[in-house]
Image (spheres, rainbow, N blue to C red):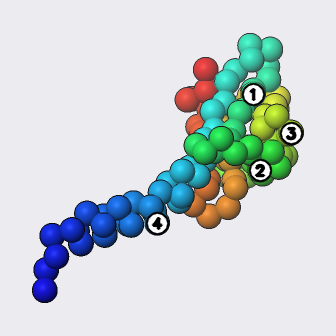
Amino acid sequence: MFRPNAVPVALALAAFITDPVAAHTPLCACYDNGDDTILCEGGYSDGSSASGVTMVVRDARGYTIIQGRMDENSEFVFDRPRDRYTVLFDAGPGHRIEIASQDIF
């Protein structure tokens, strides 16, 4: 038997179950400090800190040239490489962000 109220209840339940997953989206942005250093700031959409998240800088061939972690302020500062590079915010599967050097201003 179909109950008209069953659909809204099911949709509300589905939204409740999936909402915590969507609320923990990783965020990372990098900026050129203008002094040959790059600042990356990270966090999560629910306001969580990214302190301790692994940060990797790779050259154009994919080799790791710098590796570190977000500090207690969810920041990571590194010396700007001469050639093209990619910054990886790596908080694990489903929580990785790659930023190409040409997208850093």
Looking at the image, is mark 3 or mark 4 nearer the viewer? 4
Examine the image and state in which quarter residue 9 appears: bottom left
Q: Earlier in the sequence, mark 1 or mark 2?
A: 1
Q: Which residue is mark 1?
A: 39
Instruction: Determine which residue is flagged by label 2.
Output: 53
- Name the residue beneath numbered marker 4: 17
**Which of the two discs, 1 and 3, labels the residue nearer the N terminus?**
1
Mark 3: which amino acid? Glu
Measured in 3D between alpha carbons, the distance from the residue under mark 4 to the one under mark 1, in whole angstroms, is 35 Å
Spatial distance from mark 2 to mark 4, Cα to Cα? 26 Å
* Residue depth check, mark 1 versus mark 2: number of the one nearer the observer: 2
Is the Cβ of the residue at disc 3 closer than 8 Å to that at disc 4? no
The quarter holding residue 60 reads: top right
Residue lying at 65% horizontally and 41% vertically, measured from the top left = 47
First in residue order: circle 4 vs circle 1: 4
Disc 4 marks a residue whose amino acid type is Ile
Q: Which label belongs to residue 72?
A: 3
Residues at marks 1 and 2, CA–CA distance in whole angstroms: 14 Å
Marks 1,3: beta carbons within 8 A: no
Q: Residue furthest bottom?
A: 1
- Give the mark nearer the N terminus: 2 vs 3: 2
Residue 66 position within the rendered picture, expressed as x and y whole percent measured from the top left:
82, 44
Specify the quadrant of the image occupied by residue 48: top right
Q: Tell me where residue 78 appears, x and y as whole percent.
A: 82, 32
- Badge 2 amino acid: Val
Residue at 58% of width from left, 52% of height from top?
24
The residue that appears at 67% across and 61% down in the rendered structure is 92
Nearest to viewer (mark 2 / mark 4): 4
